[in-house]
Image (spheres, helix red, strand yellow):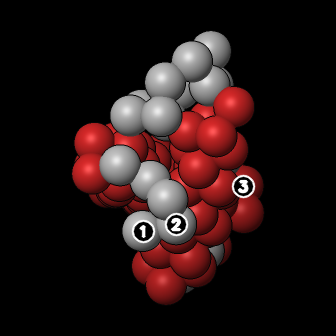
Amino acid sequence: MFGLSIEAVKDLGERAVRTFVQIFVALYAPVVLGADSLGGLLDLSTADKAATAGIAAVLSLVMGAFGTQVGSSKDDASVL
């Protein structure tokens, strides 16, 4: 897949899924916890929150793919 090793693909996938879950939970948690002081954050629909998390996950994939090309190892997505 795009010249990436299996290890790099697994690393990219894990990073993307983790990023999606973290962002979605971070955006949804105030609703569950009943926080009223967060302004417009509570006005976002579930679909908007999922889309926001999806955008962050895609950016994580792009950064990870960049990391496999310029990082210290072709087997992980780390840039450093």
Check the picture and name the quadrant holding the C terminus: top right
Numbered circle sitting on residue 48: none
User: In the shown orientation, is residue 70 left or right of residue 35?
Assistant: right
Q: Distance between the residues labelled 3 and 2?
A: 42 Å
Instruction: Describe the element under mark 3 as helix, strand or loop.
Output: helix
Q: What residue type is labelled 3?
A: Gly
Q: Is residue 22 visible?
A: no
Comparing labels 3 and 2, the label whose residue is closer to the camera: 2
Q: Is mark 2 on a helix, strand or loop?
A: loop
Question: Is mark 3 in CB contact (under 8 Å) with mark 1?
Answer: no
Mark earlier in primary sequence (3, 2) = 2
Quarter of the rendering containing residue 16:
bottom left
Find residue 39 and name its label.
3
Within 10 Å of disc 1 (Cα), the crowding (few <14, some 14-19, many 20+) is: few
| Residue with the most extreme front position | 3
- Within 10 Å of the Cα at label 2, are there few (<14), some (14-19), or many (20+) other Cα atoms? few
Residue at 52% in and 66% down? 2
The answer to whether the residue labelled 3 contacts the one labelled 2, judged by CB atoms less than 8 Å apart, is: no
In the displayed structure, would residue 69 be above or below residue 52?
above
Residue 43 point in image, percent of width and height: 62, 73
Residue denoted by label 1: 1
Separation of disc 3 and disc 1 at Cα?
A: 43 Å
Q: Disc 2, disc 1: CB below 8 Å?
A: yes
**At 42% across and 68% down in the image, what residue appears?**
1
Residue 56, located in which quarter of the rendered image? bottom right
Measured along the vertical axis of the image, is residue 70 above or below residue 58? above
